[in-house]
Amino acid sequence: MTSHTYDAIIIGGGHNGLINAAYLARAGKKVIVLERRPIVGGAAVTEEIFPGFRFTEFSYVVSLLRPEIIRELELPKHGLKILPLPSTFTPMENGDYIAAWDDHDKTRREIYRHSPKDADAYDDYARLMVRMAMAVKPLLSLIPPDLASLSPRDLVGLLKTGLYAASLSEKDLYAVAKLVTQSSGDLLDDWFETDALKGTKSASGIIGTFLGPRSPGTAYVLLHHYMGEIDGAFRAWGFAKNGSGGVTASIASAARALGVEIRTDAPVKQVIVKNGRAVGVALENGDEFHASVVVSAADPKRTFLQFVEPKYFPDEFITQIRNFRVRGSSGKLNLALSELPNFTALPGEGELHRGAVSISPSIDYIERAFDDAKYGQVSRRPYIDIIIPSMIDPEMAPPGQHVMSCFVQYVPYDVEGGWDESKKEAFAENVIATLEQYAPNIRRAIIGKQIITPVDIERIAGITGGNIFHGELLLHQLFFLRPAPQWADFRTPLPGYYLAASGAHPGGGIMGAAGKLSAQEILKDGLR
Amino acid sequence: MNSYDAIIIGAGHNGLTTAAWLAKAGKKVLVLEKRSVVGGACVGNDAALDPAPFSGGFLRPDIVRHLKLTQFGLNPAPVATDLISLLPDSRQLVLSADPVKTAESIAQFSAADAAKWPDFVRFMDKAAATLEAAYATPIPRLPKFSPTEGLPLAQLALKIRGLGARDMYAFIRLLPMSAKEFLDDWFESDALKAAIASLGIHNANLGVMSAGSAYNLLHQYLIRGGWGQPANDLRQVIAALESAAKAFGAEIRTSAEVARVTVENERVSGVLLASGEQNSAGTVLCSADPKRTFLSLVTPEPLDPEFVWQVQTLKMRGVTAMAAAQSAAPLPAGTLIVAPSLNYLERAYDAAKYGQISEKPYLEITTAGNSLSIHFQFAPYFLKNATWNAETRAKLESIVVDTLETRLPNLKSQIHNLKSLTPLDLETAFSLTEGDPHHGQLALDQFFFMRPIPGYASQKTPIAGLYLCGSGVHGGGGVSGIAGRNAAKAVLKGSL
Amino acid sequence: MLRTTPFHPRTSLINQLQNWRRWSGYYTAGLYEMSHEREYWAIRNAAALFDVSPLMKYLIEGPDAARLLDRIVTRDVQKMSIGQVIYTPWCNAEGKVLDDGTVSRLGETTFRMTSADPNLRWLNLNAAGMDVSITDISDQMAALSLQGPKARVILNRCAAKSLDGLKYFRLMENAIAEVPVTISRTGYTGDLGYEIWMEAANALPVWDALMAAGHDYGIAPAGILALDVARVEAGLILIETDYTAAHHALIESQKSSPFELGLGWAVNLEKGPFNGKQALVAEKAHGSEWMFVGLEVDWVGMERLFHEVGLPPQISPLTLRASLPVFKGSAQVGYASSSTWSPVLKKYIALAHVQKPYFEIGTDVLLEVTVEHQRKYAPAKVVKTPFYEPEWKKK
């Protein structure tokens, strides 16, 4: 048994854990990151599954790695390159397609082809979304206060939240309130009439959630697409060089450069508590590490129900964490292809292959996919978000061949009867059969496939329930309720123990924000 | 041309409440009702046994007191009837006002749930009281309101904090939850959860798995005063309100259809009847739903087109059909529901999402002697590839009868005189746009300061002198009189 | 690829630099020759032919057509006679300008609206509860603009009916090369001019006929660069350059009322309710904080700024669509949004937003200019617009 002493121990080498470590190290702290797997990256790793073909197993696009994190940690120096993913192509069931290209006039023209009304509304809608993104952005970096507390910190937090609300114009405040409470289906029905346009837009409101586009609370997530436009990233979506693993590799490199020690193959058994305070971590192999604070970048269930004995938490808190919803809803099918999919709606190789392809012909289509999942079935006709990383980054596949990442929803964690090989194959078959409807050559082109279900995500990435956001983005699991009331500020009922990942405010999809904000709070508490 | 202090459009329970309240304050009030009878959605067409959109409800106690309604024949203090879930295996789950009796019934399904029941009811009562306080709070325009306007809001905030950290957070969390999630946190028995969750979808275009159905659950619990429908006759409620209003001096005219609210220089000047008659008043209170009010009772010119758009996109989308019938055989007393499981209710709602009538519907049956009133969900106003006509009505009625038969065997041969109201009937006969009895879905985005339109939750409208006093505003939805009372108070507080 | 207008088969052959700009998703010529000078002088001295097909065009028909437009625009549409055209801005409910364009009354219940920005959604929003149909005819309809003192002669040579009786801001049905056209006496140059509207499918014969008829009168196809100079001389505003459409604005200060854009003459506060009326009545009562005015730069002062560094004045012949701060003493009191050298006036002129009270005619202000990488301040005076208005414009 060996023992080591640090200022901070971070459990989990996913992007949030690494970012948290980097910021603590940047403040001069001695930090170690303990990662269970042989590689860092959590859900964002890139691996070679077939010879010559490299896949980002789970995450697939860099939606919103906070630009200030990119700048402050100088990630481009450490190899980060975010390549554009310029278009979205949606084949339709009637053989036509609708696309959003990387040019405003071209996109307008494309939508106009389907509906002049929608072409007009598209611009107004985009402007509203940009204004809303401006309005919501400050909220993401606010530390949620405890409404019941009278401590100066919470009162200041409450005041800040109030001042923020008062700083909005009446129109914007109401628009934000509507957006937060609406379903994406209702919002889009109010604006547009073209089914495939609405389907594709609504899809971005349900990614990673166990909700259908008709579920209230999904409209807010649509904003994420517009965040990039206002915060200096200038692009809503991007694909990282070397896949999402490229992102974590660059964060890890930046963290190491700042003095962070990263230890892989180091699964944590337990957090060591002394005198009611977290003082260290014991690994499964018996090694112990000691530190002033312990930071968990694991999901809330693991953080509070597995690493720490329940006696250190109030019963109420344990109940709340048990009730925290973490149902995974998405899966992936990664394909190695001998040729590009040829879409009947727009045949041949073209611009569309360099962007996203979305199988989302209508809101009803996605809602029906959700209906299956509600009752414990894999969607018979799922929503699929496809990118072909080898078109953007030629190093991902042998020349002339391709890797294709299919993000699939809904793939419930709790599938009726449990997951087994035949269910996995059936899930892959659903996806391939769906794709075949739009790109008939797909079956012939497949030379290898990797099937990932929420159960695989749980097993490999260590995320309970396989939920890519560490907890569903439900209205009652956001802001001051995430992960539990009174504990939304990254602190926990156990002094010295912090939560620093997507299960905390502001949640998944806002990459890295939890890691950075939690580091700030830890430093505020005067980390010794 | 006659001149009044205030003209009220619509003599439903809210319109009558407003009229009585204003008349009692000494105002010269005229009520204009399109139908030949007063009572709006509380009173069916002609025969006493005709179905009405609402099968139950009662007025808030403060309204009963203020308007002295017991003096006008109102049966005081109705109690909620038992909510009896009729299960397919012919077991019954009874939720009653008596917690001990209810716990016993629940114990058939889960001892753990039975043990939690008293705590649950305690929480529900506290949460309902908080919601009622919220409904009585006038909502100023946000975010820049004056301290005077803000005072009631601050009082409400203090009241919510007064619940204590645990219940406060439980209350706040409840609002955006689905009924299923809310109940999953408490109970394990599917039958129990489904029976309670049926309140969450009652009159709502929501499933038990839709966010916001927990709020509707709480709303229904508040306005019912318990689990089943209140044991009183809505005709009697209306008769008492009518007598009170008249006794206080209000003039009520039936068969008086309003063509338009007249506006001069962006201010209300009166009401023009379809007959061509003009009545003038500086204050007009409209108890019609917001869509009817802003899209057909006023001309669009004085309104901001963005506001009109918000009205156009208000979610009405009724999903309720009603039926009434008589039975030769005796009926069990109480509020009977067909809501056997959460998945059953959710599947009933799934049909509505795609414009279909639920083949296996959620039913709520209230009985009085040999009469049954049947509340049916989901029967969406907007049918896909079909309209509401004789054929779809026949289909609806046969589903009603077949479903009843599964729970009350042999009823099929006993019932006669079945009459139904489709959502389209609710619209044409009761002026409920898209057949929505709530004048706008009680959904999260149409709740509190966003009901009916953000910025206009306090009964005022963009047209000076025009107020909304129907169910479509903050506090409204179901038979409670809250919206009517709030409107009367707002007007009296203003410059009338 | 951008879209091409119905005249592209002709214009693409004569665009010597293949200089194309974007206009509402179409290719539009910046200029046709190596310099825009001849094109500009054609406007002022002969006739210039512009392809204005990318304009947004809407057909509004039905019993409530006039009522709808009256609700939208700030001028009185109900009073328009058939065959009349009006130029008008339109506002949101806060009285801030959304767009400006023309409304033509083609019949008792038929109107055509042209605009710079798409307005289909706004038209539909406003039409709630009205008996009216709105059709986007932007693609179906091609448009040419013939501007300059010789425009009428040329048209008279090729049109079926004489244009002599067509008054300023009126339109007539006519035919050119046997193609039915509508001709309106309108334009964006402040000169004598006409706009010719036709089915997109029949566009080319009209172009050919006009070019042939104008040959002896110095007709020149002209592009955006020449047009931009002429419209500043005429004091005409350009959306997204001189003002931000209210629904595009991200902050309040980007929005302008019609009064603040110098379009108070086009606001009729006497008519019934229309979008923004209440706000505009209030603004009129209080007076506007801003005004859109002409600035005439003192040439001697300008020359001196260059002389100080030993250079002769170096002024671009192109209209500058960038913001130049306007000062009174050391305080900024506004900004010029379009500025240009006026070849016909031999003056440097600008269109500027100026704060109260400095927008009064005759006020001396300073315009910031960059001379040899240094900020300088050129003396300028607030003047009435248009800067240039030939007597034949309205005759």
Image (spheres, helix red, strand yellow):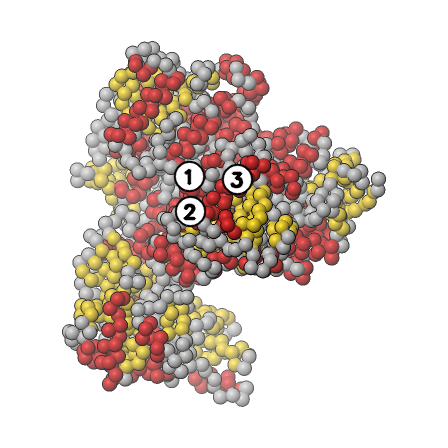
Residue designated by label 1: B446
Residue designated by label 3: A427
Instruction: Work out how far the residue at label 2 is from the one at label 3, CA to CA, in angstroms.
Output: 20 Å
Foreground residue among C251 and C356: C251
Q: Residues within 10 Å of mark 3 (few under 14, many from 20)?
A: many
Where does the image place residue A172, in percent across and percent down from the top left?
A: 46, 50
User: Do the residues indicated by labels 3 and 1 lie within the same chain of the protein?
Assistant: no
Q: How many labels does the image show?
A: 3
Instruction: Work out how far the residue at label 3 is from the one at label 1, CA to CA, in angstroms.
Output: 38 Å
* Chain containing mark 2: A
Residue shown at the point (61%, 47%) measured from the top left: A57
User: Do the residues indicated by labels 2 and 1 lie within the same chain of the protein?
Assistant: no
* Chain containing mark 1: B
Q: Which of marks 3 and 1 is in front?
A: 3
The reply to whether residue A62 is in sight is: yes
Where does the image place residue A527, in percent across and percent down from the top left?
A: 74, 46
What kind of element bears circle 2?
A: loop
- For badge 1, the amino acid type reads Gln
The reply to whether residue B58 is in sight is: no
Foreground residue among B180 and C234: B180
Instruction: Work out how far the residue at label 2 is from the one at label 1, CA to CA, in angstroms.
Output: 28 Å
What kind of element bears circle 3?
A: helix
- For badge 3, the amino acid type reads Phe
Q: Do the residues labelled 2 and 1 touch (CB within 8 Å)?
A: no
Where does the image place residue B337, in percent across and percent down from the top left?
A: 41, 21
Residue shown at the point (38%, 51%) measured from the top left: A95
- Mark carried by residue A361: 2
Q: Quadrant of the C terminus of chain C?
A: bottom left
Where does the image place residue A195, in percent across and percent down from the top left?
A: 39, 47
Q: In which quarter of the image is residue C158?
A: bottom left
